[in-house]
Amino acid sequence: MTESQKYLSRTHTCGELNENHTGKKVTLSGWVDRRRDHGGLIFIDLRDRYGKTQLVFNPQRNREMYESAKELKPEYVIAIEGIVQKRPEDALNPNLATGKIEVSAENLQIFNEAKTPPFQITDNNDASEELRLKYRYLDLRRSEMQRNIILRHRLSQVVRNYFNSQNFIEIETPVLMKSTPEGARDFLVPSRLHKGRFYALPQSPQTYKQLLMVAGFDRYFQITRCFRDEDLRADRQPEFTQIDVEMSFVDENAVLAVMENLMSAVYKELFNINLQTPLPRIGYRETITRYGIDRPDLRFGLEIQTVTGLVSGTEFRVFNDAIAGDGVIAGLSVPGGAEFSRKQVDELNRIVQEAGGKGLLPLKVKEGKLQGGAAKFLSETQMQKLTGQFSANEDDLILLAAGETDLTYKVLGVLRTHLGNQLNLIDRSRNELLWVVDFPLLEYDEEEGRYVAMHHPFTSPKPEDIPLMGTDPGAVRARAYDLVLNGTEIAGGSIRIHRRDLQQKMFKLLGIGEEEAKEKFGFLMEAFEYGAPPHGGIAFGFDRLAMILAGRKSIRDVIAFPKTTSAISLMDGAPSSVDEKQLAELGLKIDVPEIEKENE
């Protein structure tokens, strides 16, 4: 573009022109998607985030511009002025929103040229994720990625509109806060003004939102950034977003009802789907014994059956050892699994053993009877009852596991998920939401030799279980609830402790002494003494929710600029070293092992 050229200002986007615009002069701006030279005509597909429009350059109308079009390459940034015309009947493109028209070019401006991209800017390309992350600004030009980010935007608008309609107030909480390590590691920020002291980036706004309830803001929400220095995987990032919610003067039913209505609004606004509510609620222990996991995927069967009592009294040592150790015998039935090869069964055994189990006991249903190593120890009556409990038919395969209770259910849960994917049993056209409730308040950490909070230290026990806190802490149930969508936990929350005496009792159970509690949470405990209302809330994993709604398998696909699984930004090189002057201002000295310096 030269100084003398008139700037072509966009009048329409590349996704909105149709037959009604025929004959109109328009100006489009965007990126060259591809160029095709056909029989003396040059066709350009122009792309922006709204769609694509075909441009045609005809030498008989403007030879100079036609010659200029020959120089256009993919990802050049251009503007085009021209007349909208209908495409010939044999050139219609039903797969394109603008596929019935094209723009006959009359004026062209090249705003910027482009190097050849390191990968094709198309949805179907074989570029590695590492390459896509290194050139994320190019990856984000792909329509697939833009759809993901736009869906995320729309989701945030639905959330805000819904909570606003329900009298919630959006309040920002600090990003620089006090470090209270309990669970995942904090990201620390050194203070320049107070050398030797550190802020922490919030793992969640938990204490702040409880203080907002004390302050009288009875309905709070925030779409907020959170930070955890923990090992990463497909659905984790060191910085992530959550929908944070807190309410006063509520019980569990009130919180769950508001959140179900939120999910109804999300599905209605984004997909025009009417969600059936109320959502099912399943107790924690039931989810473990039926699905082997506390975030079950209800889009397929293969439910676990417990058969400990049914197979007792045999001479089979594996069964007897499990029963003698207060363990369990349980399993699941695989339709048509009797036809599995030995190699396939060995692979299932390997999966169970990698999950910590000892192995599987396979029983095939053949000619109305059970076949397998354990079958010879079972009576005819036991075999019939076993087949009946699993609803097993001819050529089905019953897979049993025996051992310590929690471990046995865990390995069967891993096996169930594997089989659901391997055998394509999951109906991916369905969306199955459920609440998991009645979690244990505490779980015992063998390594630390103490109880730790299953959710967090501010979760309230059920009132009827409070007396057990002094006699049988492991039996205390929490007023906690998780929302699960298609086998992924998308939200978790609880009714909170709002009295100082009960909070002190909880800290004591967690091995947090008075001095430590005062140092970490003294401000919250003091606030409770000034009239704290009963309150509860929930936090949604916004990235996870967006990931599932977009039909993706990784939250990196719905985050504009994510980190890798090793917490590195390949695009800008974060984290990076800083110079000595910056460190001196903060009163810090870095001691980095030589091997790490060499790898920088």
Image (cartoon, rainbow, N blue to C red):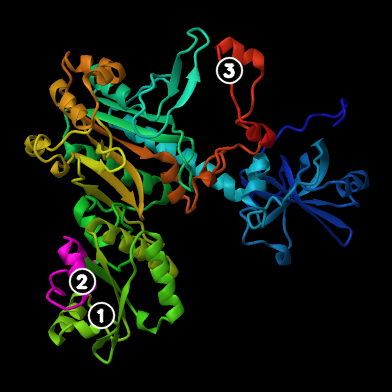
Quadrant for residue 296, please give it.
bottom left
Measuring from the top left, give residue 371's x and y in whole percent. 28, 86
Q: Disc 3 designates what residue?
A: 589
Q: Which residue is mark 2?
A: 319
Q: Report if residue 438 is visible in the image.
A: yes
Labels 2 & 3 near each other (Cβ < 8 A): no
Within 10 angstroms of label 1, few (less than 14), some, or many (20 or more) residues?
A: some
Instruction: State left or right for residue 430 relative to residue 42.
Output: left
Residue at the spot of label 1 = 374
Q: Position of residue 76 (x, y in %)?
A: 78, 42
Q: Is residue 316 magenta?
A: yes
Residue found at x 50% / y 13%? 191
Tell me residue 171's x, y (percent): 36, 22
Q: Which residues are magenta?
A: 305-328
- How many angstroms separate mark 1 from mark 3 (CA)? 64 Å
Distance, label 1 to label 2, CA atoms, is 9 Å
